Amino acid sequence: MSSLLIKNGFIVTAEKSFYADILIVDEKIVEIGKDIKKKILNLEIIDAKGYFVLPGGVDPHVHMSLKTGSIVSADDFESGTKAAIKGGTTTIIDFVTPLKERSLLKELYDRKKVASKSLCDYGLHMSISYWHEGIKEEIIKCMENEGITSFKVYMAYQDTIGVNDEDVISIMNFMSMYNVLVAIHCENGKIIASYHKKFLSEGKTKPIYHALSRPEETEIEAVKKAISFSKRTNCPIYIVHVSTGQSIKEVEKAQHQGVKIFAETCPHYLLLDKREYNKSDFDSAMYVMSPPLRSGSNKRELWEALKKGVIQCVSTDHCPFNLKWQKELGINDFTKIPNGVGGVRERLALIYTYGVLKKRFSLNHFVNLTSTMPAKTFGLYPKKGTIEKNSDADVVLWNFGYKGKITKKNLLQNCYTNIYEGFKIRANPHIVIIRGKIAFRDNEILVRPGYGNYLYRSKVKCSIPVHRSS
Ligand SMILES: [Zn+2]
């Protein structure tokens, strides 16, 4: 049995901030109170004076070891979760993405094997890329036996993992009977494909055409459609990586009408914009992700939506590819550039520095957006996402005195480029604890590959998003 006592901490949860000690026995928080004094054998005491004590971050949207065509994304579950831990994230939710006609359960078991070297705890969303009667039984088994309570559909990528509108409606109809969440990638795949054809036939092959082939309307139109399907089927939905102000307006309107709709955005849409695609050489391929970076005015609207609670979660969609050998596959054809960027290491420091310190929202709301709401939305709360008695002891000592810059010299992921190169950050984790074990201290990872547990999740733990008054 191992025990930790965190003394003199200033604890920050989504609801409140207060001074207290935390007693951890084995994997759980067993007591929170003033001046805890315990005589326990081998009790390790951690002095948290001068740090914020936060619940571990929950990143609800990452892709480690993502296969695309002939390559695999730069981070696997080992390097990717090391990066997560160093950034203060103690739980990730990744995906199982079976290709059409493959068995969901077989793919799930295979994915669990790949994920088993994870250093932090992990859950999995199940993607549905093919709809037919026989799949229903497998979906029910995923829910009942595997604790999978969120299913993803792609309106884009029609040739591979995307599903057509009719099938999206059938999927939502089915999921609504079980009240599980459907996560949706909203982009009109057909329009994007027609732009691809047009640009390539005109000899336009540079990375910027990736962005130009996915204009804002392709997202907004798909968001509207997803909302109308949700209304029709009464299925709760979660719109992944919202990138435009107009999409937010649609989401907000629907939430006011009582539609069960949740949304996330990512640090890259909050902090970067489409000017990155103007770089003259192939370097702009680093920023190729879908949806692409938008014009600058969207950033302000996204921050505002986070503040108001129209968007509930900040995820990263972490899926970096190196320029050499990987992004370079598309050096003569932008449609062949693998889509994705990193961020799992930087998420908390960026949202703290550019959200809390820029006075866009409170410290408590920062915890809400990066830990508590992701845990509630995906059925992990109160095991994850908070500091409470009986919760898992996932705790971060947050060094708010830190001053630094993100640089590729300080590489922490398996990718040698970083889209946040040069960004100032004003905080970093000092100590990270996962289920009662110190996972990171003195810049060193202290848990082994495989320490992470697979998480069986319950259903969504929150009602329709309630907005804060603006
Ligand atoms: Zn994704």
Image (spheres, helix red, strand yellow):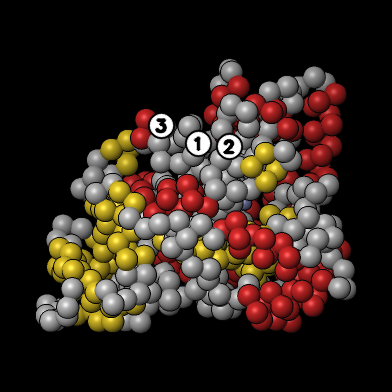
Disc 1 is placed on an element classified as loop
Instruction: Say what amino acid the circle numbered 2 marks.
Output: Phe
x then y, percent, for residue 53: 26, 64
Left or right, residue 169 beside residue 126 = right
Q: CA distance from mark 1 to mark 2?
A: 7 Å
Task: Say which element carries label 3.
Answer: helix
Q: Amino acid at mark 3?
A: Lys
Question: How much space separates mark 1 and mark 3, taking CA atoms?
Answer: 9 Å
User: Is the residue 233 above or below the residue 55 in the image?
Assistant: below
The residue at the point 55 percent across, 66 percent down is: 123
For this view, does 313 lie left or right of residue 132?
A: left
Residue 423 image position (x, y, % from top left): 37, 35
Q: Which residue is mark 3?
A: 408
Q: Quick check: marks 1 and 2 in contact, CB under 8 Å?
A: yes
Q: Earlier in the sequence, mark 1 or mark 2?
A: 2
Q: Which mark is residue 415?
A: 1
Q: Which residue is mark 2?
A: 321
SS for dot 2: loop
Residues at marks 2 and 3 touching, judged by CB atoms closer than 8 Å:
no
Please state which amino acid type lies under the numbered disc 1.
Cys
Q: Residue at x 28, y 47 (%)?
A: 443
| Residue 48 x %, y % | 18, 62
N-terminal label among 1 and 3: 3
Q: Please state the total of marks drawn on the protein image.
A: 3
